Amino acid sequence: MWERHLRETTVAATVVSDMLQYLEQHGVPAALAARECGVSLNALAVPDDRVPGGQVERLWSLAIQRTGDPLIGLHMTEAYGPGALDILGYVILSCKTIGEVLDRLSRYARILNDGMRITIEREGRVVNCRCTFVESMDNYLLRSPEQAVDTIWVGLARELRRLTATPLLAKEVWFKRKAPGAAEKKEYHRVFGARLRFAAEEDRFVMPIAHLDARVLSANPALLRTFEQHADAVLSEMETHTNGGGSKSHQVARVLAERLKGAVPPLSEIARELAMSDRNLQRALRNDGTSFQRLLDDVRRDLAIRHLANPSTSAGQVGFLLGFSEPSAFHRAFRRWTGKAPGEFREARSH
């Protein structure tokens, strides 16, 4: 099964280095923390290196335990150094407007953590930044997302305050996490200065659409082109040298799993995502011994099984999510995959 070969998410070494530096400053020896979590300090010194997500997950847990601070992601990001954002930080500083900043954040956020995606949508008078997590990977963010969401939203709030002549504020900040206690909620209000919504349906950062035109003080178009070339090279390296994720079939499966949100993305859309022609992508998949339709079938099957493990999700919802036009079509496909109807499969798994 395709799902058995999910690769582990990775995090930029600069992010992990900044975490360890923060812990050192708060009485937790960096070398000790790294050793307990399996992080190689030598590897952190290598430019553009990556740290396995499981090690980062353990580091967050250790950080909360040793500091006694459940909001450590919030406070750590307030204090981060410019280098913590890797090449993305330099790209952001060189953008012309906040609109460009958000565009580059969406494009390059995966450099910081390749299990995270940021999407930007204009809706009426506001801009919605949404944070989601990739399900087609062994992704620790699906298990413990709170600190990562805190860091990305605090980081965005901090940059909005310092990039322009007049500090900009969010309109609303949403968190899927449950509401914290009164003291912790007060800290969130202090940091964001905006309306907060906890136990929301998604993680969202909302700002007035007028913010998009605000000029960035450090704008440098020439440097931006240079930094973007570096960022694109890092993304390319990540795609081709991460635990078997370099094959075209793995890349197509990853993109399909990300895009299956009620409609099936056509092969032409996947080809554009991978910077290939339709014909070249089809040829590459044949060389991998598969096809677009077979990969789509595999991804649908594995995601269907995963979604049905959630007792609050109906078979009808799963079928819609995976792009089936009719419930009957999903039921037929599921019976072909597993030999059982969705309801029978869920009942058998519950015993």
Image (spheres, grey):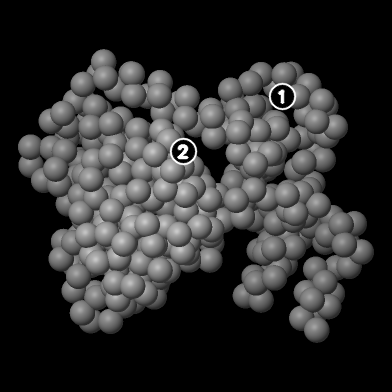
Secondary-structure class at tag 2: loop
Q: Residue at x 50, y 57 (%)?
A: 38
Give the Cα separation between the discs numbered 1 and 2: 29 Å
In percent of width and height, residue 252 lies at: 68, 36
In this orientation, does residue 87 appear? Answer: yes
In percent of width and height, residue 272 lies at: 59, 26
In percent of width and height, residue 90 lies at: 28, 31
Numbered circles on residues, count: 2
Tell me the quarter of the image containing the C terminus. Answer: bottom right
Q: Quadrant of residue 317?
A: bottom right
In the rendered image, the residue lying farthest to the bottom is 351
Classed neighbour count for the residue bearing mark 2: other residues with Cα under 10 Å, few (<14), some (14–19), many (≥20): some
Q: Which residue is mark 2?
A: 49
Q: Residue at x 68, y 39 (%)?
A: 244
Is 279 located above or below residue 67 in the figure?
Answer: above
Q: Which residue is mark 1?
A: 281
